[in-house]
Amino acid sequence: MVGANRIAGTGRLSAAGRLAFSFDGRSYQGLEGDTLASALLANDVHLVGRSFKYHRPRGVLSAGTEEPNALVGVHRDAARRTPNVRATVQEVYDGLTAVSQNRWPSLAFDIGAINDLFSPFFSAGFYYKTFMWPKAAWAAFYEPKIRAAAGLGVAPDRPDPDRYAARYAHCDVLVVGGGAAGLAAALTAAETGARVIICDEQAAPGGAMRFETGARIDGEEGWAWAQKATARLAGMDNVRVLTRTTAFGYYAQNFVALAERVGDHLAEPGDRPRERLWQVRARRVVLATGAIERHMVFADNDRPGIMLASAARTYLNHYGVCVGRNVGVYAGNDSAYAAAIDLKRAGVAIAAIVDLRETPKGALYEEARGLGIDVLPGRAVIGVDGRTRVSSMTVTPRTGGPSRRIAIDALLTSSGWTPSVHLYSQSRGKVAFDASTQRFLPDAYPQDCVSVGACNGTDDLAAALKEAAAAGERAGRATGARAKATKAPRVDASEGWSGGMPGVAPGAGADAAVKAFVDFQNDVTAKDIRQAVREGMRSIEHVKRFTTNGMATDQGKTSNLHGLAIAADALGKEMHEVGLTTFRPPYTPVTFGALVNQARGALFDPTRKTAMHDWHEKHRAVFEDVGQWKRPWYYPRAGEDMHEAVNRECATVRQTAGLFDASTLGKIEVVGPDAAAFMELLYTNPWQKLEPGRCRYGVMLREDGFVYDDGVVGRLAPDRFHVTTTTGGAARVLNHMEDYLQTEFPHLKVWLTSVSEQWAVIAVQGPKSRDIIAPFVEGIDLADAALPHMSVREGQVCGVPARLFRMSFSGELGFEVNVPADYGEAVWEALWTEAEKNGACAYGTETMHVLRAEKGFIIVGQDTDGTVTPDDAGLAWAIGKKKTDFVGIRGLRRPDLMAAGRKQLVGLRTRDPNIVLEEGAQIVADPNQPVPMTMIGHVTSSYWSQNCGRSIALALIADGRARMGETVYVPMPNGAIAAEIGQTVFFDEKGERVHG
Amino acid sequence: MADVANRDLKAMRREKLAGLSTTRERVSVTPGPPAARLALRAGEDALNSVSRALGVGVPRKPKTSARAKSGGRVALWLGPDEWLVIDEDGADLPAAAGWAKALHSAVDVSHRNVAILVAGDGAETCLAAGCPQDLSLAAFPVGACSRTVLGKVEIVLWRTSERAFHVEVWRSFAEYAYAFLAEAARDV
């Protein structure tokens, strides 16, 4: 056999499937189907890690996802180094390399274990109390040191080369858990004809049948029945069986998230994703999540070799591995007896069963006695020896008395079973305490969900299967499925589980100074919890946070109930009076990869590009991110830096012309007989009298009277407007319009359609702009009289249907050529050849910004910030004086919006024309006043203007328009900068150039 | 001007996803050919008139589509007063809609959208990587359509056959949508 602890004739793995793996550099052999934990135990390796805080040696506690101790790193290659992998979950593949964590220099000799000696100083709340002074040292010194010393595995330092997949799925019935109950529920649900998904976190469904040898269902051994049931389900068209899949989150409206491990168990995962995230919407959910065994809380109960009784049974009955050769058992209930019996029958010596109960009885007790096992009732284990592997247990009568040391090499404990109500609780269900069995069970269901089997407190197998089969059929029928379901599987034999006891065992009680661990992973002892209560914590939520009990990556699956019982005892209350902490997703740790899945790299977020993007790239544009858009920022020529390029572009546009890609502006077509009436209501401006073929600059307010968006609007026909919005406003302005149309103005006959992406927009600006476009324009008279400033015509450009606007955001004669997007680049290229002939340039957003600032044109969101009224921005002229209604009209009448002293947009000219102010800089009237100074405004836009030969800035300054000519100051680290308040227009103050 | 008039419009057209194609064992993801598209808005009372003008009975049932009796024209229901009309032959849809006397809004969006075709046994699975809707044949039969999401972008999804879907996406989101589906196709 492979490994010293494999026992021939036990387990279900084939001896033929040999695999090689390594742990901490040593090579071992495992079998196909092994977990890393079972393979290590087969090779008699119990010591697998060091604990989080005290660096205590730790072994394997469990055989499942609840494992708090056996966390290892699994390394596939330099980039694939997964920390904190549960050895009880990770399946062995040929060549697997695992390493222990949180130890230095080696697992057996760990310097950090000195923490264990100093542990009196590391009690509950230690971090909160100790490192308070000096305050700054927390972030700089204490926290990094503590994080380095107290930690789990090391995060990989390279990008994750694996890929992760995602899938949305819908079903009538989702069954969570593939134990006997889950399978029974899935079978009947599927038989009704309903669409069923059943998921199970293990490599094969079966749940407790993995270790329960005493169960027989439909004439078969429990495990064999489970595999047949699974095969039957997998063969049904309406069923999807997901193995290695953990349901980790239960959200609103039966939305359940599952993480499927696709490649982690394979030596050669190939092109498979590593994991797949399933987001399942289920009409009904059946929870069959089982129960988790609890350990005994006694002194030094964390020594390697001490594990849950059911885990030892799993290793024996499924993996064919005995966890010791001379095994002690410490029982608070019957289920631990079964472990002793199975091991004894497999030929393993049982040193003794120590039973807390004074008078154990029943079939298992009798059977153990019959096998000659020494049962010690009414006794407790009060301590153990053996640091890196348990070597003996010290047993006394539970009421006190002489102690006795019994040599052992493994100790199996069980203090009872905790129903897994995590998902039920996540579904917003409130658990109810069952006093007779001392456990919390599901109560009312806030969602279309039901629990069956052990997670519902139904311990008896026959009762559980009956309950599950009925629930599955009911769930199927509830979704409208009508086919007949068969009866529940027949249970021929089963094992009974009895209650147990939460809380401390003797010897670890109130007076004891021993380390009796409650939460292994976070190194929380019974003493810590009692101390938390002594220090004033009353709520279990406070006890949890003060001690960190249940806050490790295992989320307290084995510890929560113990912690609660100890806190309740210390508080002198009943457990239900103290209450359970809230369960939150995820049930088990989920990789970021699974959550992110496809959303990485180019798929992290859409990158939006205009129709002319390739041209910009070819012409070496530097791009600026504007939301999701890539916009050309400037086009540097050889040897030019940004400043030089922008200066050149700015000068060229005003001297000759420039081409600018304005495609990203939002465009909305407003159509209908009430289009003008609608525009009147949404914008401050008057629209009724705007003639078809003409344009107007529009200002849109929110209800509160502040500027929301702006843009040029062209009237194409009496019932059709072409509205432009800011780039950033494209989506929200349409929503804003739709919102008002549907809720406030539903009587208007008008419809809105986004055409932002229908049109590629080429702005041609500058004195030569008409010359540049003229050769390509058909059907539109470009003469000034026929197409004056602020006009729009439909015609053809380069033979392509076009909307040609005569408008300007630069203050120059200008046009904006709108063509269907697929033609954008070709039309741009055609215009470009003509532009080059005329000595024009392409220009980017930076030049666009400078040119508009030279003209005092605002940019909503830069010169406004959501607290600026049209009047503040100098746009009072854009409000229709005769209008009686528009969105924001009442807001504008609020006293504080009409009060004197509001900040108003003004121009700023620095005394030294070479100084360019910083945007966002604060402005004061008196640079010499003491700090804190009175700020009277701030700089909103600031540039070097090549055309003005000086710096220019726009600013919002209190009462700004009444301060023309005054000098104000911008305090900066190197002294205050003096600037004079003036008009917002810096260039062509009379505005003659737009007329060509 | 003469050279302008003679210019070949086809040659001037730069299709957004030109040249891209993904073929895997169970699914293919390919850009659809250019088509004429119309954003149609109309009230209940105008539907007969508009349907006659367009030669396709615009569907009134949510999430359904209707094809013209002949030719490649389809009307997809997007909302109680909203349809997307697609003409694969590139007909002048605004002109056709213009024949309707009843009140409506017809806006040319031929270039706003790009089509991506997802076909094969694994088409449904491929889309399920990013579309939260139930795409099973029972819930989303042939002819079904819906405005929905794919990953982080909005799409219009239309099932053209048991094993084929037509995705409509805004032009600047097409690269993302295509890349998303191509990546999803690896897990089909």
Image: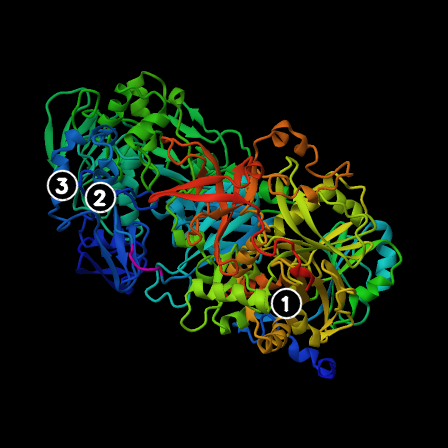
Using the rendered view, name the quadrant where residue A74 is placed: bottom left
Task: Locate residue A219, reporting x and y percent.
Answer: 44, 48
In the drawing, does residue A105 fall left or right of residue A583? left
> Disc 1 versus disc 3: distance between alpha carbons?
80 Å
Q: Are marks 3 and 2 in contact (CB under 8 Å)?
A: no
Most distant residue in the top direction: A572
Q: Amino acid at mark 2?
A: Lys
Q: Amino acid at mark 3?
A: Ala
Q: Secondary structure at mark 3?
A: helix
Predominant SS along the magenta part: loop
Q: Which residues are magenta?
A: A156-160
Mark seen at residue A603: none
**Mark 3, other Cα within 10 Å: few <14 / some 14–19 / many ≥20:** many
Most distant residue in the right direction: B101
In the drawing, does residue B137 fall left or right of residue A694? left
Residue with the mark numbered 2: A344
Q: Earlier in the sequence, mark 1 or mark 3?
A: 3
Specify the subunit that label 3 lies on. A
Q: Secondary structure at mark 2?
A: helix
Residue with the mark numbered 1: A767
Specify the subunit that label 2 lies on. A
Q: Amino acid at mark 1?
A: Pro
Residue with the mark numbered 3: A113
Q: Earlier in the sequence, mark 3 or mark 2?
A: 3
Are the residues flagged by discs 1 and 3 from a single subunit? yes
Q: Secondary structure at mark 1?
A: loop
Which mark's residue is nearer the viewer, 3 or 2? 3
* Residue B89, above or below A157: below
At a point 56% along the width and 31% down the height, the residue shown is: A901
